[in-house]
């Protein structure tokens, strides 16, 4: 016998939040019957599979890494917020669009400073970080990033190398960031940095935040070009993503400086143009439609420009303000 009930998650990065869990004989398990049975399992610092978390009082974690259920609470919460974002913003029920929840595995290995999506297990895996520079990689933009790799696999299936690989990575950063904005939970305040929450030395609200990537100025990582050029596709996909990340930032937010999460976002542009953004909601709809309708496994940057313009034409009208803004934002990152 099982039933959806409301529990408490005491997370590392998102404060205390509500979670839908599963009431079972003698207690609760970290499984969400209202979101396709999505669940979180304990990797127990091993590299094999583990068991779904169980608890006697339906309060998960204690906001510190000392309790193994804390990172589990973050992962399950991030998966729930990602589910809600895709359902509410795009009408998509789960990664496969079939109402089925994926599972998350936390505490993978020891000192593992990464997270990844696997099509094979239809699951996310999260490491604990090295404990010196990085804490567990279960922040919202990372959970959203990994699950968006799953959505890509089920739709465009952009190949993970060359320019399509950069677009695949950008898709995950873009939608992962949209997940962080969707949650807007007052603790992990949204921004266009990726992974800022897991850097141990970052002080919340300080102007200079370390991050894995910077969507508004990709070169801030010293690796990711702001502007397209031939040869971009030879870079690691986590660097060739920057051009599309910056495109999306400029489309949503425009060129004027803004502050998010206490961090100044002064965007780069490649042609000196100045323009207003169309807002995150419209930019997200355009990107998602392009991904699911126009992009294919071999779409490159030129194809991404064409596909997003087609998506905007469909959604807002041929030659609409929005469609013209898409063209303007691509031109601002040298994709002409
Ligand atoms: N965290 C990396 C990513 O999702 C791991 C990988 O799969 N390349 O991009
Ligand atoms: Zn990725
Ligand atoms: Ca972020």
Image: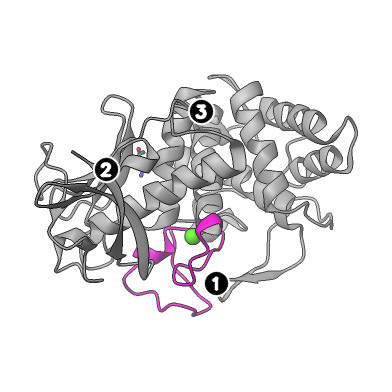
Name the mark on residue 159.
none
Name the mark on residue 39.
2
Labelled pair 3, 2 in contact (Cβ < 8 Å): no
Labelled pair 3, 1 in contact (Cβ < 8 Å): no
> Residue drawn 80% across and 51% down?
271
Please tell me whether residue 107 is drawn above or below residue 318 in the rendered image: below
Q: Could you say which is closer to the camera, residue 303 or residue 101?
A: 101
Please tell me whether residue 292 is drawn above or below residue 331 in the rendered image: above
**In the image, residue 188 lies in the stretch drawn in magenta:** yes
Q: Is mark 2 within 8 Å of ligand 1?
A: no
Q: Could you say which is closer to the camera, residue 54 or residue 66?
A: 54
Q: Where in the figure is residue 52, as x and y percent of width and height?
A: 16, 44
The residue segment tinted magenta is: 182-211
Q: Quadrant of residue 167?
A: top right
Q: Is residue 193 left or right of residue 3?
A: right
Name the mark on residue 162.
3
Q: Quadrant of the C terminus?
A: top right
Q: Could you say which is closer to the camera, residue 300 or residue 231?
A: 300
Residue beneath disc 1: 261
């Amino acid at each position: 016998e099982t039933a959806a009930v409301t529990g408490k998650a005491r997370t590392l990065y998102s404060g205390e939040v509500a979670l839908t869990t599963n009431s079972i004989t003698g207690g609760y398990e970290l499984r969400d019957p209202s979101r396709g049975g999505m669940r979180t399992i304990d990797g127990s610092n091993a590299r094999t599979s583990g068991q779904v978390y169980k608890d006697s009082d339906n309060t998960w974690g204690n906001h510190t890494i000392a309790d193994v259920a804390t990172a589990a609470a973050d992962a399950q919460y991030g998966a729930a917020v990602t589910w809600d974002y895709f359902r509410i913003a795009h009408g998509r029920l789960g990664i496969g669009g079939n109402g089925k929840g994926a599972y998350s595995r936390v505490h993978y290995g020891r000192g593992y400073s990464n997270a990844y999506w696997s099509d094979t297990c239809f699951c996310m895996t999260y490491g604990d970080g090295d404990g010196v520079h990085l804490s567990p990689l279960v922040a919202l933009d990372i959970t959203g990033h990994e699950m968006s790799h799953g959505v890509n696999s089920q739709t465009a299936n952009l190949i993970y190398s060359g320019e399509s690989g950069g677009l695949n990575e950008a898709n995950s950063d873009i939608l992962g960031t949209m997940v962080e904005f969707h949650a807007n939970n007052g603790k992990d305040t949204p921004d266009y940095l990726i992974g800022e929450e897991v850097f141990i030395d970052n002080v919340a609200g300080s102007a200079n935040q370390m991050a894995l990537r910077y969507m508004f100025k990709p070169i801030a990582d010293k690796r990711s070009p702001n502007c397209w050029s031939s040869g971009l596709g030879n870079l690691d996909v986590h660097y060739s993503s920057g051009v599309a990340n910056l495109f999306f930032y400029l489309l949503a937010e425009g060129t004027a400086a803004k502050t998010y999460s206490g961090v100044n976002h002064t965007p780069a542009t490649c042609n000196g143009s100045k323009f207003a953004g169309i807002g995150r909601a419209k930019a997200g709809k355009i990107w998602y439609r392009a991904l699911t309708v126009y992009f294919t496994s071999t779409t490159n940057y030129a194809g991404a420009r064409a596909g997003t313009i087609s998506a905007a034409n469909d959604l807002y009208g041929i030659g609409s303000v929005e469609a013209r803004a898409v063209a303007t934002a691509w031109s601002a990152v040298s994709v002409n």
